[in-house]
Image (cartoon, grey):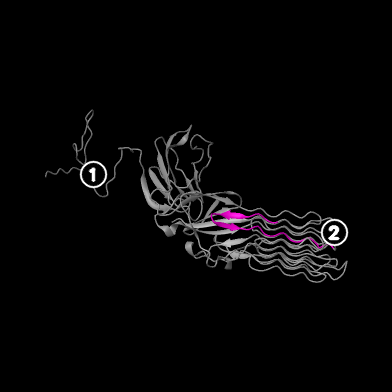
Amino acid sequence: MSKIEVNTVEPQCGTTLTLGGSGDTVALGSGASQTGFGRTGTVDWETTPKTGDFTAVNGKGYFVNTTSGGVTMTMPSGAAGSIVSIQDYNKTFDSNSLTITPASGEKINGGTADGDLIISTEGQGLTFVYVDSTVGWKTVYENDFTGGGSSFMVATGGSITTSGDYKIHTFTGPGTFCVAAISPSAPNNAVDYLVIAGGGAGGANDGGGGGGAGGYRESPGSATGCYTVSPRGAAPATAITVTATGYPITVGSGGSIAPPNGPGGNGSDSTFSTITGTGGGGGAQFNLPVPCGGGPKSGGSGGGGGGRSGCVGSSGGAASPVTNPVQGTAGGPATPGTSPGSIDAGGGGGGALCAGAAGAPNGPGGVGGAGGISSINGTPTARAGGGGAGSEVGAGGAGGNGGGGAGVSGTGTGTSGTVNTGGGGGGKGTGTPGTSGTGGSGIIILRYKFQ
């Protein structure tokens, strides 16, 4: 083997210098650098992911990790032929976006000078080349890697957030949980769920019952991180194992308010896969002397009773249908009337965990039952509280923890259940004007492992 060592090769006018022959490799020695050879349209990738704001360098590629929050990348000052690439590190741009900011006065893809480019597509990668001052940094290559080679499921639908290694899809209205790819490992295809139906509306005067909370259905949480769940997540409830298909989502609306002397309307059901949360029962209206009617309605949680004027106060509505685990509780009874014109207070609507309280003589109205608390989205949150009852004279009953609306005294208006909690509406006190409160709409939250 021959070896030639030189320190410098002097250029000669009009001379072509050839290094190596066909099949040979020309390598730079350790610590040496090259200039003047130009780039080939590729970049040198930095393999340590960027997790915070940074300024890019010409000729570099970056893996950007937005798991913990959005990141801003500032482009270098452009010169013709400059090149920069980015790639979504772990498919989180859809949850926390990457913002690309040009250098002062420059453009991206011919847009406005200094205008940002927001990248919010899961798994996206882009390569930019600086062309000229007219278009600035031009996108010359784009990809979208989501499911390829993944050992975890990939899905879309609803509002998507992350909590550690888990994705959470929150639906506050109808939609589709679309599973684009499943994992080869069956346990990674398990989806924990929280399904809450719409709450019932409160009943009308006198001493209208509180609306029952929407049915509360929850998996144990052990499949996706062992987060804290309510007692409604006890066995035999289990996570749902999904396949690569679309799962229609129905989120129940809250029950409508009672007419001047009517019972509250029931909430609507919420559904995901085989799980249905039943709409909460409406609260009772007052009981007329002849006949003694206007009783409360059954539902995911039952509506509270109402009554006066010589009739026995109505009992609360039942939690129906019965599921295992149960999805709610019964509404509370109204105070029984003893003679025409006697003063009554309605019963509170049932909550996910606790039954509604009975009304008291001369008020206050019955308190709504407490809802359940779940950390499925990473934050302990109470939902599905029963509505408080109305009272003719005494104070209205408080709504149950978890979005239940308060009942009202006299001719005021009951408080509506909180939106997207399934809380029951508050009952009406007496007379006109004023109405009972509407039920709060439901919610569906799904959770699975994505990394």
Nearer the observer, 421 or 95? 421
Amino acid found under the numbered disc labelled 1 = Ala
Left or right relative to 426: residue 115: left
Work out whether 7 lies above or below 150.
Answer: above
How would you rate the neighbour count of disc 2 (Cα within 10 Å): few for under 14, some for 14-19, many for 20 or more?
some
Describe the element under mark 1 as helix, strand or loop: loop
Nearer the observer, 182 or 136? 182
Q: Main secondary structure of the magenta part?
A: loop
Residue 85 image position (x, y, % from top left): 41, 43
Residue bearing the label numbered 1: 27
Over which residues does the magenta segment extend? 266-288
Quadrant for residue 293, please give it. bottom right
How would you rate the neighbour count of disc 1 (Cα within 10 Å): few for under 14, some for 14-19, many for 20 or more?
few
Residue 358 image position (x, y, % from top left): 74, 70
Residue 229 image position (x, y, % from top left): 56, 66
Amino acid found under the numbered disc labelled 2 = Gly
Left or right relative to 270: residue 331: right
Residue bearing the label numbered 2: 431
